[in-house]
Image: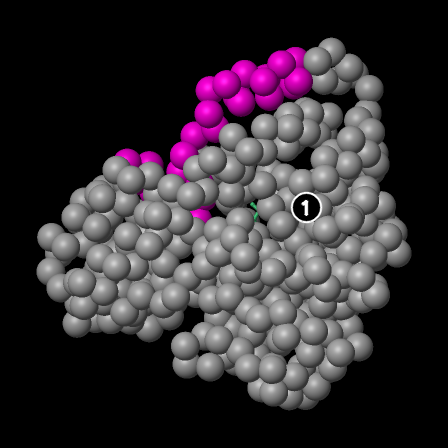
Amino acid sequence: MGRVTASLSDLPLRDDLRGLTPYGAPQAPLAVALNVNENTHPVPDEVASDILDDIAVALRDVNRYPDREFTTLREGFAEYLGHGLDASQIWAGNGSNEVLQHILQAFAGPGRTVFGFAPTYSMYPLLSQGTGARWVAGERQPDYTLTVEDAVAQVVEADPDVIMLCTPNNPTGTPLGLDVIEAVYDAARGVVVVDEAYQEFAPRDAASALTLLEGRPRLAVSRTMSKAFAFAGARVGYLAADPAFIDALRLVRLPYHLSALTQAAAVAALRNASTMLGMVDDIIEQRDRITATLEALDYEPHESWSNFVLFGGVADPHATFQALYERGVLVRDVGIPNHLRVTAGTEAETTAFLDALASIGSAS
Ligand code: PMP
């Protein structure tokens, strides 16, 4: 007799979770995986062995719970971010997804709303709904930018409890001016989160929302080690905000949520920040090569300040995705009509993508 299995509808699941689909970017074993905006460069050998040394030390004390306040790591992030920040203004979690979840657990929840300008990071609705909050999608200009007037008008209309501003925005790569962030903050009564997951790929002179933190206790700026630091598998994200904001997050985190091994690895990686970030310039170069080549192939790439490029002019995104897949290249169909998104890989991976695309034929 076969095992009798239940389906989700047989379980007493929360009504507000019925019908939702989990995050599910494919993890296909293709040679060239350019679909989830990872840093495809491995951690340099000398840094990897330095990190291993620290993990080995932490392992000897792993019978004890880790530092619940991950003090050394918070000091490391404060130093890395600069802008006069100190450890009391820093928070961290297992990826910035967890950091965002902490924010939503503390400031969203049942009966509350979370607002963002679509298209934007696909996890915002899911994280919001996970806390029982309602996700409200605003709109962007046709080129995915936002003007001060339009952004403010939409925020006033929605009157949300939490506002998610992603810059550079995923999946479009679009930067957001500090003037928009300031104006949205002034117009809102809720918490404003600026997700700077891709900030290290922006032009060097681009100002970060970190410069706006002073005197704005409802503002938080989140970052991640998953992209520029090539540390996606270690799961480390962090944010900077007012110390009172950080206190709110302490109410919802699980005790000891950052393992001793994670803390050790992240502290060692930060110590090697300049080497870890050495690949960023190369990635920017590949991103710009993708943009230029896509234009030459008659596709319509959008301006990107991140490590990926969203491009239009794709007659049938599903067919192009499939044709690339068959050539060993994984990209992302983000559900925007006539568009696909590709992550800038190493030079060889980027060449493989561009050659594969060119071999499929030109744009629509
Ligand atoms: N924010 C944005 C905009 C992202 O694109 C991602 C990853 N795709 C994250 C946050 C989460 O990254 P992580 O949890 O790995 O830090």
Taking 154 as reference, is 12 above or below it? above
Visible in this render: residue 107?
Answer: no
**Horizontal relation, residue 130 to residue 172: left or right:** right
Please say which color scheme the image uses: one colour
Q: Residues within 10 Å of mark 1 (few under 14, many from 20)?
A: some
Q: In which quarter of the view is residue 147 placed?
A: bottom right
283 shown above or below 261: below
Image spot of residue 259 (x, y percent): 72, 30
**The C terminus lies in quadrant:** bottom left
Image coords of residue 291 (percent x, y):
30, 59
164 or 289, which is in the foreground? 289
| Direction from residue 78 to residue 38 in the image, left or right | left
Amino acid bearing label 1: Leu
The verdict on residue 38 being magenta is: yes
Relative depth, front residue between 186 and 11:
186
Assign a secondary structure to mark 1.
helix
Q: Quadrant of residue 115?
A: bottom right
Q: Residue visible at 73% across and 26% down?
A: 260
Is residue 273 something that shows in the picture?
A: yes
Q: Is residue 104 magenta?
A: no
Closer to us: 204 or 4:
204
Residue, disc 1: 81
Residue drawn at x 46%, y 81% is 141
Q: Is residue 15 above or below residue 158?
A: above
Label 1 lies in ligand 1 vicinity (Cβ under 8 Å) = no
| Position in image of residue 286 (x %, y %) | 33, 47
Q: Which residues are magenta?
A: 28-56
Does 320 sit left or right of 91 as displayed? Answer: left
